[in-house]
Amino acid sequence: MNFTNELLDGVKRRYGLTSDYQLCKKLGVSSSRVGNYRSERSNLDWDMAFRIADMLQVDDQYVVYGLLKDKYKNPRINSVLENTAPL
């Protein structure tokens, strides 16, 4: 599972949502957008990522490091992130 899906599932758990449709309504986005996030056809933009961080009450740095791995599939970048991330 990628980090984006972990964040989305975290919102569902925190707010007792039982479907991605309810998640869409909570986030104020379309169901196709959440579907694209889930299938990795698109990545969370930073504004949405920080909004979710606020909803989950997690540190911004945690979200940045986690999402950078989703956004960049370069092994060298991911190696650096894994060795320096405060996760």
Image (cartoon, helix red, strand yellow):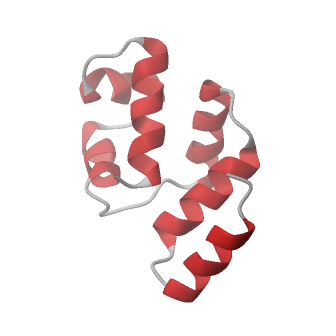
Q: Is residue 4 left or right of residue 60?
A: left
* Image height of 4 relative to 79, above or below: above
- Give the residue furthest to the top: 16
- Give the residue furthest to the front: 83
Foreground of the two, 33 or 5: 5
Picture residue at 35% right of the left edge, 52% below the top? 37
Foreground of the two, 45 or 66: 66
Instruction: Write down the quadrant of residue 59 in the picture.
Output: top right
Instruction: Write down the quadrant of residue 65 in the picture.
Output: bottom right
Picture residue at 45% right of the left edge, 79% below the top? 73
Q: Position of residue 43 (x, y in %)?
A: 44, 59
* Residue 28 makes an appearance in the image: no
* Residue 47 makes an appearance in the image: yes
Q: Position of residue 48 (x, y in %)?
A: 56, 44
Q: Position of residue 68 (x, y in %)?
A: 58, 66
Q: Is residue 15 left or right of residue 18?
A: right
Picture residue at 25% right of the left edge, 56% below the top? 39
Q: Position of residue 19 (x, y in %)?
A: 24, 23
Picture residue at 30% right of the left edge, 49% below the top? 38
* Image height of 10 relative to 77, above or below: above
Q: Is residue 46 left or right of residue 16?
A: right
